[in-house]
Amino acid sequence: MNALAKKERLAAETVSDPRWATIVARDPEADGKFYYTVKTTGVYCRPSCAARLARPENIGFYTTREEAEKAGFRPCKRCHPDRPSLVEQYAARVTQACRMIEELESATSLDALAKQVGMSAYHFHRIFKQITGLTPRQYAAALREKRIRDELGRGSAVTDAIFDAGYNSNSRFYEKSNKILGMTPSSYRAGGIKAEIRFAIGECSLGSILVAQSDRGICAILLGDDPDKLVRDLQDSFPRANLIGGDANFEQLVARVVGFIEAPGIGLELPLDVRGTAFQQRVWQALREIPVGQTASYTEIARRIGSPAAVRAVAQACATNKLAVAIPCHRVVRNDGTLAGYRWGVERKRTLLEKEAVMSARELQA
Ligand SMILES: [Zn+2]
């Protein structure tokens, strides 16, 4: 058998193994169930390893890390398969944080909690939500709500109950208890000056994806390798907004956006909250008019929006796009057709364009 055929056979074997999909998805739930080895680097990894995905023909599967080591592979320096898994470490830290929230008499900040368990605030927020299904704030509020109900049930004065339940002023209680009391949240009364933005992070074939939604629509779709960095990007983009980890309904929305990223041709039938200068809006609108499977140059876009000299400003508007794929800045290329930069990495741009080319070719055949 020649080398190429052998390579193809090995790749096909890996790809047909259900474990391959969990590696591609970097599924943390698969951690502990098996390890995979990479022939070219000589290391073995957990399924969720964030390292660049190896070619399928170079992958091997082992049930235990002992087996992988016996076969001559070293633990990966990125995912440390020889240490307690991240999931185990996170679960321990979240449990620790829950105990702290329960024990504290008054509200504590996200920063303080995160610091106590040795994580960044954003990372901690995300992990806490992932494991408990609630944000730390929601968890603390649920505890307080229970305490308030308990106190009120015992017939104590409302104000006493409020103080006993850990609120340090009445106004704070009424503000925080809007949900409990069913009143209109004060942020709505304030006219959205400090908008609430819900967000959640998922995984797609392009890596991590953050989807954020304001009360007007999807306001950010960010792509990257590092979920923490995506949340920081979101905070930088909306510095005054109150960021809230998504609930179960929101996870469904993320799933829809991921579906759209995997197959942009189906369109994203969701309202977008596009914020930018008038010029940026014109550029972004022009980008949305480039059909799936086609590209345009920066020069062409500048001409289409009636500002032929503004090529650099067009490139700048592409670089500040916050809605990956929904505003398809990946369809803009250099005049000679080569790929210029992409806010989320030129490799992702290449992958997206290749996928779209295949899709539109299929549509033509159909
Ligand atoms: Zn690894």
Image: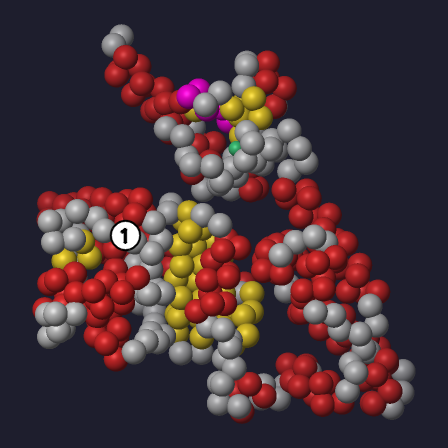
Residue at image position (31%, 44%) is 347
Whether residue 51 sits left or right of residue 167 in the image: it is left
Residue 168 lies, with reference to residue 250, above or below; the image says below
Residue at image position (39%, 70%) is 218
Name the quadrant of the N terminus: top left
Residue at image position (11%, 54%) is 335
Q: What residue is disc 1 on?
A: 341
One can see residue 365 in this view: yes
- Is residue 150 covered in magenta? no
Whether residue 109 sits left or right of residue 231 in the image: it is right
Within 10 angstroms of label 1, few (less than 14), some, or many (20 or more) residues? some
Residue at image position (43%, 69%) is 237
Instruction: Give coordinates of residue 305: x percent, y percent.
Output: 14, 73
Whether residue 186 sits left or right of residue 284 in the image: it is right
Specify start and end residues of the magenta stretch as a single range. Answer: 36-40
Residue 261 lies, with reference to residue 1, above or below; the image says below
Classify mark 1 as within 8 Å of ligand 1 or not, answering yes or no: no
Residue 103 lies, with reference to residue 32, above or below; the image says below
**Residue toward you, 21 or 111:** 111
- Which residue is at the far top? 1
Q: How many discs mark residues in the rendered view?
A: 1
Give the structural element (helix, strand or loop) at label 1.
Answer: loop
**Residue toward you, 39 or 253:** 39
Instruction: Give coordinates of residue 364: x percent, y percent.
Output: 10, 49
Instruction: Give coordinates of residue 320: x percent, y percent.
Output: 33, 65
The chief SS type of the magenta part is strand
One can see residue 260 in this view: no
Instruction: Give coordinates of residue 355: x percent, y percent.
Output: 24, 46
Q: Amino acid at mark 1?
A: Gly
